[in-house]
Image: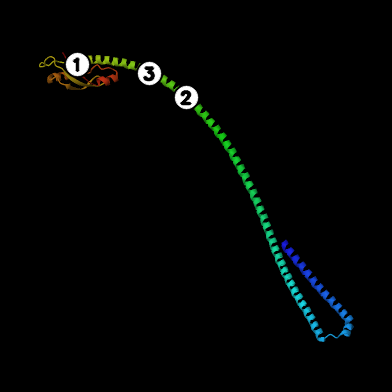
Amino acid sequence: MMSVYQKFATSFALALILHFSILALFGISFISESENETVTQKSMPEIIQASMLDDEKIQIEAQRLRSDEQHKQVVQQDKQRKLDNAFKKQQQRLEQAKKQRVQEEKKTQALAKKRKQLAQKEKQERAQIHKLRAEEAARLAKIKVQKQAEKVRVEKQRKAEEKKREVARLAEQKQQQALVAQQKAEAAKKQAWGKQQAAAAKAQIAKDKQRTISTSAAIQSKVNNSWIRPISSSKGLRCTIRVKLLPSGDVMDTTIVKSSGDRVFDRSAENAVLKASPFPVPKDRALFSKKFRSFTFVFKPE
């Protein structure tokens, strides 16, 4: 912009100098003509006295002078027109430059406004980022505190559970020890009871065996005493008889399980069993049911 103004100032100065030069030339020409007229007026008598100039030459000279003057005017007008045109062009350039400057200033102002808006926006964005970072930092700090609290809570809960499990383990161990002691005591008691029961069972078995033997002998003796030997039976015969009794000792049924080979002898044996009824049976129902409700015995009278 300063170069345009400098150019305009230079052109304007040149135009002024040119105008002053033309005016000076006109002034000098006017003074020269006045002096010539004075000299002519002063020297006219001398010229008239000396000789008469030819009118034609004077007219020619006047015509030449007028032509020169017209030429000078034409040249001067052409110069002035050129200067005016140059001045107009310069004015147009100045106006164009001014418009361009105004446009550039508007652009500069718009750019400055835009930069200001961008700066404001950037400032707001930085503030927003700062706010978000602060919020994020606060959130992370809160999460950290929560995690720490959760860690403490979990650790506390873990220790409480471990303590609870340890207490439960000790209680269970104590209970197991008591149970083992109880089981040992019960086992010892059971073993003692078993030994006692075994001894009692053994004694009972021995007693039942003795009763069975004595009862069997009594039955055998009673059957033998009730037997009537058949005339046709030979000595040394024997048969096996199954007998079914009632709890009272009465005979319900008899069956020859193993024959002697002599039917008469076998029949006489069955008759002896029926005749000997009721048998002397033990009062112990268990022993009766086990040994004498249904039993077999070998009948051999001799």
Q: Within the image, what quadrant is residue 270 found in?
A: top left
User: Which amino acid type is marked by label 2?
Assistant: Gln
Instruction: Classify residue 53 as left or right of residue 178.
Output: right
**What distance separates the C-alpha of mark 3 from that of mark 1?**
45 Å
Asked if labels 1 and 3 touch by Cβ distance under 8 angstroms, the answer is no
Q: Within the image, what quadrant is residue 135 found in?
A: top right
Front of the two marks 2 and 3: 2
For label 2, the SS is helix
User: Which amino acid type is marked by label 1?
Assistant: Val
The N terminus appears in which quarter of the rendering?
bottom right
First reached walking from the N terminus: tag 2 or tag 3: 2
- Which residue is painted at 22% across and 14% down in the image? 217
Image: 55 above or below 220: below
Asked if labels 1 and 2 touch by Cβ distance under 8 angstroms, the answer is no
Q: Within the image, what quadrant is residue 249 found in?
A: top left
Instruction: Classify residue 203 as left or right of residue 57.
Output: left
Bin the neighbour count of mark 1 within 10 Å (Cα to Cα): few under 14, some 14-19, many 20 and up: many
Residue 283 drawn at (x, y percent): 29, 17
Image: 7 above or below 217: below
Which label belongs to residue 191?
A: 3
Which label belongs to residue 223?
A: 1
- Which residue is painted at 61% across and 42% down in the image? 137
Front of the two marks 2 and 1: 2
